[in-house]
């Protein structure tokens, strides 16, 4: 029997337990002082004026779409190579996701493809920094400025990743990070909105908390709001994680380097490309397999040997829920479709060992050899 190596695993231990103990002993489990501590620490790390903790990345994106005024018929340009959580918040507000083709190397939005999708109904661009690597933000910001569009960054996979030395999450009007256990850092469930805009920050704080008045009168409500609050237990875990985030990121970068070193000579796979103007903080580790190899069988082979692997991500525009509703079809975004049909994710987590990576690469090599079409 092979041992099992999961696709992902959170990096939690004594520091998180100490924080949980402190919060439980404080008797304050809801929205409270630990959350404010987490927000202040997060804003400082990323380099924004405000950080507003929420109960998930999806909830955070929903609030940024609402604050941006996205409503029925409004169009938001975004990436088809992503996760449903970046697309659905547009639809929650009645808006329409307008997909735009990706770059074949980074799998992020290709800025050169964006302008042709702009119509009088376009209100915003939602770049998704995929897999821990920033989008090419200079041209995206230029296009937004020229056409007077709001930019909201989906930075859920790119904590502390940089573009030309600047952190993701600091380019748009606002950005959203996520802390599900497979992300670079976790709070269990959780997310964070960041912005430099004072008014938007007030609106996010109000909307996450039942639309409660910004003047903080207990029973005054300015909006029809939501319950997207983060509790203090989650915030405590977040503080512990942020306190060691530099170590987390350097371990992830070392693990990715280790994969790359072992796989660079393997025939049949193409490694993920990090652009020289970016630093990647590695959300996942993926490879593309050649056309001559049956990707789905490679995944099955890995799984049968106890190694977690998944096709990651499927093309969003080909999901039935969006095809039926918005009329997308096969052939709309050939680069995204080609990446989606040949990509696979390998086990990747902060504490993965050299020895595990070595084993995974050997099994992957067997899987490639035995699954030529
Ligand atoms: C994780 C993720 C989100 C948000 O996820 P939640 O599970 O709601 O925290 C949004 N967009 C992308 C691209 C993600 O990977």
Image (tube, rainbow, N blue to C red):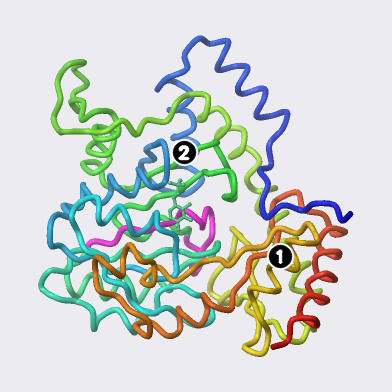
Can you identify the residue that label 1 sits on? 256
On the image, the x and y values in percent for residue 259 come to: 76, 68
Residue at the (37%, 85%) spot, across then down: 331
Name which residue lies at 29% across and 79% down: 114
Give coordinates of residue 292: x percent, y percent: 67, 90
Residue 204 magenta-highlighted: no
- Which mark is first along the chain, 1 or 2? 2
Task: Identify the residue shown where x is 63% and y is 70%.
Answer: 344
Q: Can residue 106 be seen in this view?
A: no
Mark 1: few/some/many CA within 10 Å (<14, 14-19, 20+): many
Mark sitting on residue 190: 2
Give x and y (percent) for residue 119.
Answer: 14, 76
User: Residue 349, percent across and down?
Assistant: 69, 52
**Residue pushed farthest left?**
120
- Asked if residue 101 lies left or right of residue 4, the reply is left
Q: In which quarter of the image is the N terminus?
A: bottom right
Q: In the rendered view, would you say 33 is above or below 283?
A: above
Point out the stretch of residues depicted in magenta: 150-166
Give left or right: position of 100 versus 341: left
Q: Nearer the viewer, residue 37 or 257?
A: 257
CB of mark 2 near ligand 1 (< 8 Å): yes
Left or right: residue 214 compared with residue 247 = left
Location of the C terminus by quadrant is bottom right
Secondary structure type for disc 1: helix
Mark 1 residue's CB less than 8 Å from ligand 1:
no
- Residue 51 sits in quarter: top left
């Amino acid at each position: 029997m092979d041992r099992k190596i999961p696709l992902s695993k959170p990096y939690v231990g004594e520091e998180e337990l100490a924080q949980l103990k402190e919060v439980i002993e404080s008797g304050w489990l809801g929205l409270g002082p630990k959350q404010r501590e987490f927000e202040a620490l997060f804003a400082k790390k990323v380099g924004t004026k405000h950080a507003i903790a929420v109960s998930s990345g999806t909830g955070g994106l929903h609030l940024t779409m609402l604050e941006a005024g996205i409503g029925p018929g409004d169009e938001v340009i975004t990436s088809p190579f992503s996760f449903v959580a970046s697309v659905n918040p547009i639809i929650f507000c009645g808006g329409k996701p307008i997909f735009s083709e990706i770059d074949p190397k980074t799998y992020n939005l290709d800025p050169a493809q964006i302008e042709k999708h702009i119509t009088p109904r376009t209100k915003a661009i939602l770049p998704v920094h995929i897999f821990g690597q920033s989008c090419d933000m200079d041209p995206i910001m230029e296009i937004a400025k020229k056409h007077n569009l709001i930019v909201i960054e989906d930075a859920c996979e790119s904590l502390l990743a940089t573009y030309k030395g600047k952190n993701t999450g600091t380019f748009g009007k606002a950005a959203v990070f996520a802390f599900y256990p497979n992300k670079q850092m976790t709070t269990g469930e959780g997310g964070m909105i960041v912005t430099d805009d004072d008014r938007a920050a007030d609106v996010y704080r109000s909307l996450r908390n039942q639309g409660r008045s910004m003047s903080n009168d207990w029973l005054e409500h300015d909006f029809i709001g939501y319950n997207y609050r983060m509790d203090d237990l989650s915030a405590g875990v977040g503080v512990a994680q942020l306190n060691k985030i530099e170590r987390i990121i350097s371990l992830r970068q070392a693990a990715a380097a280790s994969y790359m070193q072992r796989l660079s000579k393997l025939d049949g796979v193409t490694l993920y490309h990090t652009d020289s103007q970016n630093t990647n903080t590695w959300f996942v580790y993926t490879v593309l397999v050649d056309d001559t190899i049956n990707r789905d069988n490679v995944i099955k082979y890995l799984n049968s040997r106890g190694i977690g692997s998944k096709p990651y991500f499927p093309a969003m525009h080909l999901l039935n829920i969006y095809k039926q509703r918005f009329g997308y079809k096969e052939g709309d975004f050939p680069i995204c479709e080609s990446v989606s049909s040949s990509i696979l994710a390998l086990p990747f987590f902060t504490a993965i060992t050299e020895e595990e990576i070595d084993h995974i690469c050997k099994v992957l090599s067997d899987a490639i050899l035995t699954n030529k079409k």
